[in-house]
Amino acid sequence: MRGWIEKRGNSYRINIDTGTRDAGGNRKLIRKTLKGVGSREADAELTKMLHELNTGLYIEPTKLSFSDYLDKWLPSHTREKLSPMSADRYQREIDNRIKPILGHILLEKITPVHIQAFVDEIIRAGRLKEDKPLSTEMITYDLKIVKTALKKAVQWGLIPRNPADSIAAPRATKKHKQEMHILTEDQIKKTLATLKQGKDHQKYVLILLLVSTGLRIGEALALEWSDIDFDDAVISVNKTVQRIKKEIIVKPPKTETSIRKVTIDDHLVATLKRHKVRQSERRLLLANKWKGTTNKVFTGPIGGLTVPSTIEGWWIKFRPEVGLDNVRLHDLRHTHATHLLASGQVDIKTISARLGHKNASMTLNTYSHVLPAKERGAATVMAHLWT
């Protein structure tokens, strides 16, 4: 296999003789034209192409559809950049929205017109299997996948420029925040009392822990007994549990600040100790029927991991029993933070660290609804100084 370079005006053409012949008996050549480069860059590109051909890594751009390219790109992007959940989401968007519209086009033939038509089409089509418009966030997300994939194609030398760079996502409409439902003290007491009297004691322990610590449900379900220091009354939060397709995955939290230590009160310590004893008794009772290891704080009925979707499904069925019809499980986290902030006894930095937020500003923005009442309280305190 040999190659040579021809200078053609302001460009260089690389020619490589593959040593094979086509159906008509003619020598099979691979050609590539480079514009806006010097002879040194052309020599380097020839060397690179020869190496890729000799090692089987060369992909002839004219024969590569965008669909086939995405199949080659996503695994490498997943290894470098994505969590398992994000990789699964990328794959779904590629299969369901991107490939049906852009997949048949040859990679080197994709133009900005194709990308704009893609954006227009997913806006027109709306949500899959639903007669509803696609959110601006979702349109932006899909366009981001296309842009990122094509950016790598440029880096790999498959195309000269990114045709998606000039395409902008639709202007975002003001995002409607899902309403928080903050439980009152009476509602918390009623919920816990009902659960405590129920048959599934573990649900009582879990809800008590969520409202007492502000942990996310995935963080709570990933807890192991070794994460709980009963002597110092501290829980170490260092992982979360997710279901990706049919696989249950335990992994580190998404951000460094989510890895934290959370103090707990004496009542929760005692409750967790009793739960551990009950769990051990049940494990001994079930003997060989018990599944999985013995180190998880919260398990299924016969051991093994429990996933957030299972608990959320149970909560939706349970909540009307205590008059919390619209309260989400995540609202227990909001309840915890709101009551701490409203008490005036815990500073915002401590609350932020307890929740695993990136910074105190995020906490203030999330729970700004508490601040007007605190502001009125501050005015009353000052008034007492001179009245």
Image (cartoon, grey):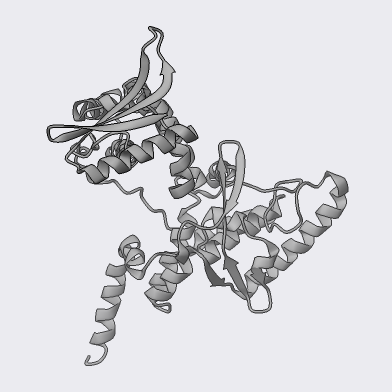
Viewer-nearest residue: 272 or 226: 226
Q: Is residue 254 above or below residue 264?
A: above
Q: In the current view of this chain or complex, which residue is farthest to the bottom? A: 386
Which of the 4 image quarters holds residue 222? bottom right
Residue 271, horizontal then vertical, whole percent:
68, 66
Residue 5, horizontal then vertical, whole percent:
26, 33
How many marks the image carries: the answer is 0
Residue 198, horizontal then vertical, whole percent:
69, 51
Residue 331 relative to residue 113: left or right: right
Which of the 4 image quarters holds residue 349? bottom left
Q: Residue at x 37, y 25 (%)?
A: 17
Residue 70 visible (yes or no): yes
Q: Is residue 103 above or below residue 369?
A: above
Residue 130 visible (yes or no): no
Residue 140 relative to residue 216: left or right: left
Q: In the current view of this chain or complex, which residue is farthest to the top? A: 24
Q: Residue at x 49, y 64 (%)?
A: 185
Q: Quadrant of the N terminus?
A: top left
Viewer-nearest residue: 40 or 270: 40
Residue 14, horizontal then vertical, whole percent:
28, 31
Q: Residue at x 54, y 46 (%)?
A: 319
Q: Is residue 7 above or below residue 235?
A: above
Q: Quadrant of the C terminus?
A: bottom left
Viewer-nearest residue: 278 or 32: 32
Residue 37 relative to residue 84: left or right: left
